[in-house]
Amino acid sequence: GISVVEILALTGAFWNHTGLRYREQMACSPGAHEKSASIRRVLTKQPEARIAWLSALFVLVYIGVEVSLGGWIVEFLLHVRKGEAFASGMGATGYWLGITLGRILLPFVTNLIGLKIAVTVYLTAAMAAELVFWLVPNFYASIIAVGLQGFFIGPMFPHAISAVTSLLPQHLHVVVIGFVAALGGCGASLLPFAVGMLAQRFSVTALQPFILACLGLSLIIWLFIPHAKRGKAFF
């Protein structure tokens, strides 16, 4: 049922975005005819390569964090915080609800303070919430902290795509965004697998320092992504 709603919504939203319209836009895009936007060129020639690889790594780590937390929250709340099964399950619900609200509400804040600063602040806040989740041995504090984590990391993926479209000319968007999404999606399998290995070796308590380290890595990667002035591409 939900898939049908999604198909109808996407069809309506992109009804006028035809191949003909895309080719017409590309014909008017500066530099569109200079060289073909091949994946090899984009990934090996500067400055496109820097933006593509950093953005892909950022999304990879972010998606890994998102899925790892979503998959291991209940286990952590049950066995470490000694919560009831239903309440622990609601903790996961609160986390995903936080992600949803973050994606809806935080872009309004981003428009006020700028993309670079906003993502830096959101990641810092997510790390602070992670510290509370890890170090405060209280079930309800953990529930609130993980919900706040979801809220602050919620807009990371759309903001990363926004950075790509701001930094690169239009004729490179399809190639680079496709690469970023493809490589970034690997994080959904790699990082949860790593958490599982650590949990098997050290118990599920290994989740918290691992997530904190990944959030810190995301912040470092983000700081290396160039800053684009509003309305202007990087080159």
Image (cartoon, grey):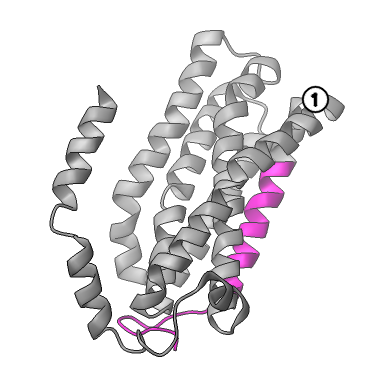
Magenta region: 210-235
Up/down of 78 relative to 118, above or below: above
Relative to 31, 195 lies left or right: right
Q: Amino acid at mark 1?
A: Ser
- Name the residue beneath numbered marker 1: 203
Horizontal side, residue 144 vs residue 217: left or right: left
In the image, residue 84 above or below residue 130: above
Q: For mark 1, give the secondary structure.
A: loop
- Quarter of the picture containing the N terminus is top left
Residue drawn at x 25%, y 82% as measured from the top left: 27
Instruction: Identify the residue shown where x is 22% and y is 44%.
Output: 10
- Whether residue 81 is visible to the viewer of this picture, yes or no, is yes
Q: 10 Å neighbourhood of mark 1: few (<14), some, or many (≥20)?
A: some
| Residue at (23% x, 63% y) in the render | 19
- Identified at 61% across, 42% down, the residue is 130
Asked if one can make out residue 115 in the rendered structure from this viewpoint, the answer is no
Residue 72: x percent and y percent?
Answer: 62, 27
- For residue 212: magenta? yes
Q: Judge whether 70 appears above or below 120 on screen.
A: above
Q: Position of residue 205 (x, y in %)?
A: 75, 29
Q: Is residue 49 left or right of residue 165?
A: right
- Residue in the foreground of this view, choosing between 107 and 67: 67
